[in-house]
Amino acid sequence: MIFLDAAAATPVRREVLDAMWPYLTGGFGNPSSHHTLGEGAAAALAAARSAVAGVLGCRPGEVVFTSGGTEADNLAVKGIALARQAANPQLDRVVISAVEHPAVEESARYLERFHGFAVDVVPVDPTGRVTPAALAHVLRPETALVSIMYANNEVGTIQPIAALAEMAHARGILFHTDAVQAAGWLPLDTRALGVDAMSISGHKLGAPKGCGMLFVRSRVRLEPLIHGGGQERGRRSGTENVAGAVGLAAALTLAQGRQAEQYARVAALRDRFIGAVLAGVPEAVLTGHARERLPSVASFCFPGTSGEAVLLELERHGVVCSSGSACAAGSDEPSTVLTALGISAEVAQTAVRFSFDASVAQADLDAAAAAVRAAVASIKSLGAGQDR
Ligand code: PLP
C-alpha cells in the first residue's frame, strides 16, 4: 500500500513510542498523587511541557495539554471569546476565515447560537490566502478574536500569519491560529508569529491520536470549557494524559530538529509529483497556492470524474489518499474550502488530496502519479462508454 493520506493521520514514530512507554507501564502514576509514582509522572509532564515550550519559544506555563486539535481549537475560540466578552460585553464578534477546519468554524457558530456573538467570515483569494486587506475589511471595534489557520488541511495553502496577527493587534484584537497541519513543517516560534494562541495535534506529527496542545500567551484570559479538579492551571480539568504529553513533546522535538532538511526534500518530491500528475492528466487542476503551500500536500480536481470514483480506482492500484479532509470524507456536499476558492460545486466534487509525511519515497510518488493517470483514464473511458 502507498499511503498518501498523512494529513489525516500518521503512524506513531518508534522514538515517540519509546519515550511514552515508561508512562504507560511502570511509571503510570497520576501526576496529582503525592507519592513517588505520582511525582514521577508530574516530573515527566513538566519536562514535556518545557520541551514543547522550547519548540514554541514560549513559557512552559503557556502550554495547555488537550485531547487533540479539535479540543485546542474549541478552547481557543470559545475560551478566549467568552473571557473577553465577560470582561467587556461590547466585544461580541469573532472573525474566522472561509477555509477553517470545522473545529474552529463550529466553535464560532456555537458562540453565535448560544452567546450572542456575530461571526464575520473573511474570504480567501483563489489560491486560498487571506490577504491583510481582506482581514482589515472585517475587523470592527467589537471584534474579540480572530482565528485563521496557519496552513489548510485540504489544499495546503499557508497563510501570512505574522502579518495577519499584527493587523489584529494594531486594533487591540487577539489572534489564534490552528497550526495542526503546519506543525512539523513550518516554524512554530510563537513570538516570531506574534500569535496569542495556537493549536497543535499529536497524530499529524507521529504521536498518537488523542493528544494535543493549545499555546495561550500568559496575559490572555481564557474561560475553561472542561471543569473539574483544576489541572492545567485551571484551564483544562481532567487527569493529564502523561504519556500523550510526553509523546507530543518527543514528536515536536524530533520534527523541529529535522525541519529544514525535510522541508526541502519533501517539497522537491511534491513538485515532481505535481508535475507528473499534470503531465499524465493535462485537464487536472492543482488547487491551492502554487508556492505558498505545505511541502506535504498536493491537491487536485480532475474535471469529468468524481473524487470518490478516483479514490476507489486508486485504492485498486494500492494508493490510499482522500477526497478532501478526513472530516468531510463520505459527505455528498462539495468541500466548502474549495468553493471558498471560487471552484464550482461540480468541479469541487472531483477533488483528491494526496498528503505525505517525511518518510515519503520518490518511487512511491512516481508509482502514485502513474496510478492517477490510469485511474482517471479508466473512469473517463467508462463514462464515455456509458454516454454511447
Ligand atoms: N485542525 C486542522 C487544520 C485539522 O486538519 C484537524 C484534523 O484533521 C484538526 C484541526 C482536528 O485535530 P484532531 O484530529 O486532533 O482533533
Image (tube, grey):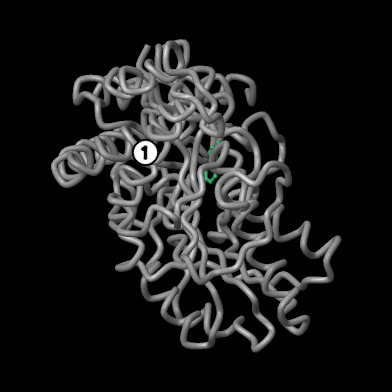
**377 or 271, which is in the foreground?**
271
Mark 1 lies on residue: 48
Whole-percent x, y for residue 204 in the image: 42, 34
Q: Residue furthest front?
A: 35
Query: Which residue: 47% across, 15% down?
Result: 315
Task: Inspect the image, locate mark 1, and give the three-letter code of the amino acid beneath it.
Answer: Ala
Helix, strand or loop at mark 1: helix
Does any portion of residue 131 appear in the rendered image?
Answer: yes
**In the rendered view, would you say 146 is above or below 305?**
below
**In the rendered view, would you say 293 is above or below 380?**
below
Whole-percent x, y for residue 200 in the image: 46, 46
Query: Which residue: 45% across, 34% down?
Result: 42
Q: Is residue 76 left or right of residue 126?
A: right
**115 or 233, which is in the foreground?**
233
Question: For ligand 1, which image quadrant applies?
Answer: top right
**156 or 76, which is in the foreground?**
76
Looking at the rendering, in which quadrant would you find the C terminus? top right
Q: Quadrant of residue 340?
A: bottom right
Query: Which residue: 38% across, 16% down?
Result: 21
Query: Which residue: 62% across, 32% down?
Result: 329
Q: Quadrant of residue 387?
A: top right
Numbered-mark total: 1
Looking at the rendering, in which quadrant would you find the N terminus? top left
Does any portion of residue 347 appear in the rendered image?
Answer: no
Is disc 1 surrounded by few (<14), some (14 to 19) or many (20+) residues within 10 Å?
A: many
Whole-percent x, y for residue 251 in the image: 32, 33
Q: Is residue 369 left or right of residue 350?
A: left
Q: Is residue 301 left or right of residue 235?
A: left
Q: Is residue 93 left or right of residue 327?
A: right
**In the rendered view, would you say 56 is above or below 23?**
below
